[in-house]
């Protein structure tokens, strides 16, 4: 009896699917990890990194809550020199205010008769001391010449101011009644000349010229409405502003030469002669 031929084993041609499936699984896991890393913050990434490292090294995991809490930088503490400098500045300001109050009292004593008549007011503000003098106590109507009594009173004020080092601004003010003379074409000239007249008294009394400034405002800065006799009389005044703040040294603003040079400059072409 003839032997049966041994049946040939069937060759499996689909074994590559196993490797392909493993590759797809690893690739999917890789993209999942990449997505997870891209959507976590720095604190969570640190926790994940420590966990993976400890898992592979068989080290117990010990994650503190500080890793999950963002650290807010604390403002630097004020140093001792800065605090000392601030205290010195406050002390200097306090001494300056006390000196200004003492000066205001001396000025009121020097102008006591005019203060009692209601023609002088001494005001203390955050800027300094302002002395408002009615023009009737200094000048005649439409004039800028001081009478003898007012000149003596202003000289007493100047002697008080000369003992300090504060800047002084003298302001001339008028009402809205127009003036038009050969000497004063408008209220601008009248107010400016009156302020300059008081300034000359102060300069002659010993106040340094670099501390003095004269300004004529005319009718532009009234303190009362000009619709009454009392209001207009209140607006005709000379204000002496004693500034408690010393002028600062100016700082030059740098100019960008390159940007200025980059801008096209306007040129004017010469006219072409007609032929």
Image (cartoon, rainbow, N blue to C red):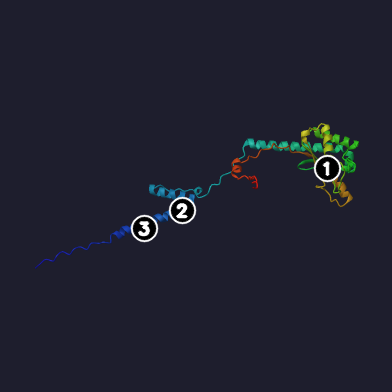
Q: Is residue 119 visible?
A: no
Q: Secondary structure at mark 3?
A: helix
* Label 1 vs label 2, nearer the camera: 1
| Occupied quadrant, residue 254 | top right
| Residue at x 43% of width, y 53% of height | 34
Q: Residue furthest bottom?
A: 1
Q: How far apart are the alpha carbons under marks 1 and 2?
A: 76 Å
Assign a secondary structure to mark 2: helix
**Residue 32: x %, y % from top left:** 42, 56
**Considering depth in this image, is 216 or 62 the residue closer to the camera?**
216
Give the label on residue 25, or none. Answer: 3
Cα separation, mark 3 vs mark 1, equals 96 Å
Residue density around tag 1, few if under 14, some if 14–19, many if 20 or more, within 10 Å: some
Q: Earlier in the sequence, mark 1 or mark 2?
A: 2
Q: Is 99 left, or right, of 147 in this rendering? A: left
Instruction: Count residues near mark 2 (Cα–Cα under 10 Å), then give few for <14, some for 14-19, many for 20+.
Output: few
Instruction: Estimate the x, y position of residue 54 in percent, counting from the top left.
Output: 41, 48
- Residue 189 badge: 1
Quarter of the image that includes the N terminus:
bottom left
Return the x and y of residue 240 as percentages of the image width and height. Answer: 81, 40
């Amino acid at each position: 009896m003839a032997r049966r031929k041994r049946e040939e084993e069937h060759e499996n041609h689909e074994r590559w699917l196993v490797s392909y499936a493993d590759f797809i699984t690893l690739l999917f896991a890789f993209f999942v990890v990449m997505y997870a890393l891209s959507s976590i913050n720095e604190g969570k990434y640190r926790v994940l990194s420590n966990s993976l490292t400890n898992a592979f090294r068989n080290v117990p995991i010990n994650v503190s809550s500080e890793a999950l809490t963002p650290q807010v930088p604390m403002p630097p503490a004020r140093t001792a020199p800065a605090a000392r400098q601030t205290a010195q500045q406050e002390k200097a300001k306090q001494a300056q205010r006390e000196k200004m109050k003492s000066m205001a009292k001396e000025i009121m004593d020097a102008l006591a008769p005019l203060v009692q008549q209601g023609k002088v007011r001494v005001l203390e503000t955050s800027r300094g001391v302002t002395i408002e003098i009615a023009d009737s106590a200094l000048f005649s109507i439409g004039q800028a010449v001081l009478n003898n009594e007012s000149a003596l009173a202003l000289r007493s004020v100047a002697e008080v101011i000369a003992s300090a080092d504060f800047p002084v601004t003298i302001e001339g003010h008028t009402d809205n009644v127009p003036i038009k003379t050969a000497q004063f074409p408008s209220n601008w000239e009248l107010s400016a000349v009156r302020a300059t007249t008081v300034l000359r008294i102060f300069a002659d009394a010993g106040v340094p010229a670099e501390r003095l400034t004269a300004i004529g405002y005319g009718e532009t800065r009234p303190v009362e409405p000009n619709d009454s006799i009392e209001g207009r009389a209140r607006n005709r005044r000379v204000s002496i502003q004693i500034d408690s703040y010393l002028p600062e040294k100016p700082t030059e603003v740098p100019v960008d030469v390159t940007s200025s040079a980059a801008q096209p400059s306007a040129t004017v072409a010469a006219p072409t002669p007609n032929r």
